[in-house]
Image (spheres, rainbow, N blue to C red):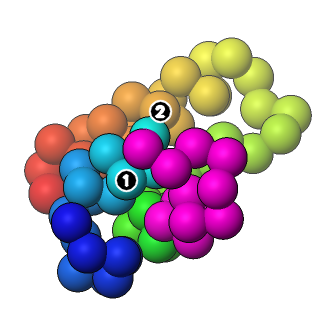
Amino acid sequence: MSDNFEEMTTEELRAYMDEHQGEEAEELAFLEYKSRLNWKKVKAGVSPQEEEQIIQNLIQERIKS
């Protein structure tokens, strides 16, 4: 496995991070891994019902794509 994080698959990045825990290389791999994720957050102060609906909507979006 090369150290070119952009060429690694997501699974390879996760394995690389596991193998290099506590090292600077782990942090660099995590930055690449994190950049690939489509982070979605629930705003603070929403009701539990609203939060559940937002999460359900995100799940449905993910299923469609």
Q: Position of residue 57 (x, y in %)?
A: 38, 39
**Residue 18 higher or lower than 3, as above or below:** above
Query: In which image quadrant can residue 51 be found?
Result: top right
Which residue of the protein is positioned furthest toward the top in this rendering?
48
Query: In which image quadrant can residue 19 be found?
Result: top left
Indicate the amino acid at tag 2: Ile
**Residue 9 higher or lower than 49, as above or below:** below
- Per the image, label 2 sits on a secondary structure element best described as helix
> Who's the residue at 53% across and 22% down the image?
52
Q: Residues within 10 Å of mark 2 (few under 14, many from 20)?
A: some
Q: Give the magenta-colored segment's residue range.
A: 19-31
Q: 8 or 1: nearer the eye?
A: 1
Dominant secondary structure, magenta: helix
Badge nearest the viewer, 2 or 1? 1
Viewer can see residue 38: no
Indicate the amino acid at tag 1: Tyr
Q: Which residue is mark 1?
A: 16
Q: Which residue is mark 2?
A: 55
**Residue 38 higher or lower than 64, as above or below:** below
Quadrant where the N terminus sits is bottom left
